[in-house]
Amino acid sequence: MAQANLSRNERISGWVFIAPALVLLGVFMIYPIIWSLWMSFQVGKGMNFSFGGFTNIIRMTKDPVFIRALTNTLIFLVVQVPIMIFLALVFANALNDPSLRFRALFRTAIFLPCVTSLIAYSTLFKSMFAGDGVINKALLAVHIIAEPIAWFADPFWAKVVIILAITWRWTGYNMVFYLAAMQNIDRSIYEAARIDGVPAWARFRYLTIPMLKPVILFTTVISTIGTLQLFDEVYNFTAGTGGPSDSTLTLSLYIYNLTFKFMPSFGYAATVSWVIVVIVGILSFLQFLVARDRRPAA
Amino acid sequence: MSAVARLRRGLVYVALSLAAFVSIFPFYWMIVGSTNKSADIVVGKATPGFDLFNNVATFFATVDVPRVFWNSTFLAVVGTIVTLLVSSLAGYGFEMFRSRFRERIFALLLLLLSIPFAALMVPLFVLVSQMKLVNTATAVILPGIASIFIVFYFRQATKAFPTELRDAARIDGLKEWQIFVYVYLPVMRSTYAAATIIVFLANWNNYLWPLIVLQTVDNKTVTLVVSALTSAYVPDYGMILVGTVLATLPTLIIFFLLQRQFVEGLTGSVK
């Protein structure tokens, strides 16, 4: 709540403290946003452009590569985020039990992946999933598969590897947020439910999940934004191509290619980038709606 | 404990052990891989070999190691210090001197948080080239200094900063900037520690923006150089894994040194 009567000294200080950040954000955030909005209505190559109205938007609807990138990005989003959030919740729930042994060890182990650099883990996954690599060897040894899977040459499996890689890296990160939130839940609620004979899964479903709703919402929005911006993994797994045959091309990678690989077409790239902004906006809004609707009427 | 409870407990251990194994295995793979020949790595050899020194030698012969590590360290350290300074000042300012207008600005900033970097990357690049900053450390650091996420983080943490301390300092005649430096900074040590890890990791691991801005080999960072090695026609994985070990080491060391503050920072406890 805004405090009313600040002294003259305080009014000035208020601005002085936030001024450096505001100036930098103005130059490196607000200005680029406005520039990019304006740019998305310009057509032309390089720095020679002219007003094109909705030309870029029309071009987008007819651009099969853009449709591919959009579809891929949405597939990554719809498959990966729910799996990761679910796993993170389950692990957090298991680790929240004070009578469990080796809790700190399990927590650190599961959290560790998110400390690695994106490049390090991209490289690791690339070598592990090589044609004759350790993953194929292991799967063959336990007879899950009859012949090696060509992970990076097959459009389906290439997507699978990327989903596995992101899930590996970020599950522990989300788990720590849930663990932190779970520690604030009063344990006596669980005791009461246990004495009333509520089974473990129901305690998880009807006590833990509803109480964690704000954190789940926060992590879902953050993960959604992250997945929609997917770039580093794909760029490194596929040497920047988004292959095989565009099957792992994401919107961010396409924007990068439009700007820095092909003859730069800034206007069109800016238009594609606004698609991400619009999707983030719509999804965040929907996620807030869902979270609000499920709140029990008090 | 009933038989069912014991069985369930057993299953929990199995599931957690499996998760821990899956989480740790790539680290094991990375370290073991750095001791093997590339030919052995791609056929899935998961036991230590004798090629560590060879791989290290190849890595040092291919990559100007001191140079790229200096580049990464410089960018991460300078970037972290300036980001913490500017963003914590703003977080403190927004929380301690509240006015209706500044609250509106803050709300707008939170809205901007959801704008993905992909939307800014093109205009930022044009902006940086107009400022003639392409291929400089300044260009890498500058756009990240005012981090809305860190401003937000510091504002939340400042809510736990006792205003009595500020009032007492005012009565003692300290100016506002002196209160920030001599009272706020020491009290908020653990918040700064957690923010240091978050920002340092983000800077050290940063990939896309440096990839765009840094164009000559002598300016590139560890992540850029190691990543470039993997796109060779026949990547030498033994040498590359040596590179990834070296690139991951600083982040692992920092994580284990400051682990407690990091978890505290994430949980938002600054009491």
Image (tube, rainbow, N blue to C red):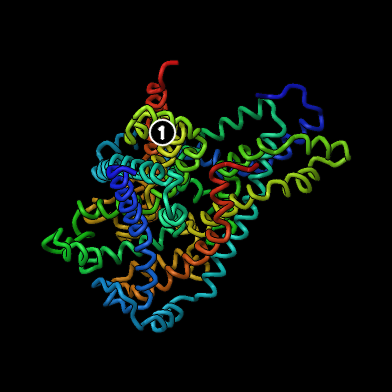
Instruction: Name the quadrant of the N terminus of chain A.
Output: top right
Residue shown at 29% from the left, 57% from the top? A241
Q: Quadrant of residue A50?
A: top left
Q: Quick check: A255 left or right of B131?
A: left
Q: Residues within 10 Å of mark 1 (few under 14, many from 20)?
A: some
User: Does residue A56 appear in the picture of this structure?
Assistant: yes
Q: Report the label total.
A: 1
Chain under disc 1: A
Residue shown at 22% from the left, 56% from the top? A244
Which is more toward the observer, A98 or B250? Answer: A98
Which is more toward the observer, A78 or A170? Answer: A170
Q: Quick check: B10 left or right of B206?
A: left
Q: Position of residue A119 (x, y in %)?
A: 41, 61
Residue shown at 88% from the left, 40% from the top? B172
User: Does residue A53 appear in the picture of this structure?
Assistant: no
In the orientation shown, which residue stands out farthest toward the top?
A298
Q: Which residue is mark 1?
A: A208
Instruction: Name the quadrant of the C terminus of chain A.
Output: top left
Tell me the amino acid under the disc marked 1.
Thr
> In the figure, A231 relative to A127: above or below?
above
